Image (cartoon, rainbow, N blue to C red):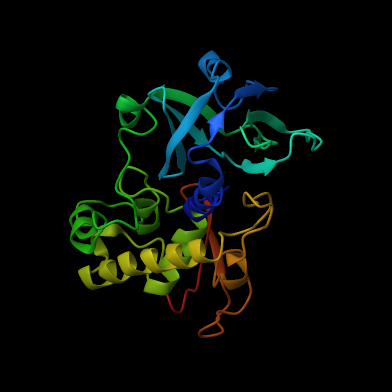
Amino acid sequence: MPELPEVETTLRGITPHLLNQSIKKVSIYQAQLRWLIPDLVSQLLDVIVIGLERRAKYLLIHLNNEQTLIIHLGMSGSLRFCAPNDERRKHDHVIFHLNQAQELRYHDPRRFGCILIEPTISVFKHPLLNKLGPEPLSPDFNAPYLIALAKKRKKAIKSLIMDQHIVVGVGNIYACEALFIAKINPGKICSEVTAKDIKALVNAIYDVLSAAISQGGTTLRDFVQSDHQPGYFAQQLSVYGRPQQPCLICKTEITVITLGQRSTFYCPNCQK
């Protein structure tokens, strides 16, 4: 599914074209996504987009009527700009009609995403947002913070950094990659990971997410950016999706196990 870099890439792709634009109307062709799209979304008329931001994997589109759209891309969702006369694709479920002969279309074959709406003043109190951990690229996510949490827990370190209450947006791909960079076995119990290694892990998470964002995210199956181009970070993955292939560092065969119901890739020699 789209992870934090893919969502950040989408945000950066749509912002220049959507900020300060008027949404003339909204056409909904399939309202049943993960949750039913509220009627208030289809009733948006002549509202202006006054701000866009990302919180975890959610896109927040702030409107001048004091409402905010909450959009999640689910497992296969994407947003792209089209001309009004472009043929609507089968899974283009929602179209935002803009004021410059342009449309923003929400495409989601699996319908695991969502489009919700909330008063802007209370948007961060929404149940989807109010208990999220810090952003991994923000100063709030740092070594002392993670060290304090890790020493109290007996769960696997990979499960800890994928917990959205601990830190947002570190999905399966980037958790595997960051743990490889930090040379930490993903199944190692949190309380057994040294402070030095946790500091290296925090730095690795920052580096791998920043690198992925700079290259437009990771394409595995469905993800495309708002300009229809795929992400390119998959070309640089060190362990994820490389079972039985040689480690790029030591040539040991990459191992895959299941942790927290997710496939987990690592080098048993480099990661202790």
Task: Please say whether residue 134 is visible from this viewpoint.
Answer: yes
Quarter of the picture containing the C terminus is bottom left
Q: Name the foreground residue: 265 vs 130.
A: 130
Decide if residue 192 is on the left or right side of residue 218.
left
Work out whether 181 lies above or below 258.
below
Q: Is residue 127 left or right of residue 232?
A: left
Pick the front one: 259 or 174: 174
| For residue 89, side relative to residue 167 (left or right) | right
- At 46% from the left and 39% from the top, the residue drawn is 58
Does residue 243 appear anywhere in the picture? no
Q: Residue at x 42, y 66 (%)?
A: 178
Q: Quadrant of residue 108?
A: top right
Residue 77: which quarter of the image? top right
Give how far across and how far down residue 20 sits, in percent: 48, 38
> Residue drawn 39% across and 52% down?
159
Residue at x 66%, y 22% (from the top left corner): 27
User: Residue 63: x and y, percent?
Assistant: 44, 29
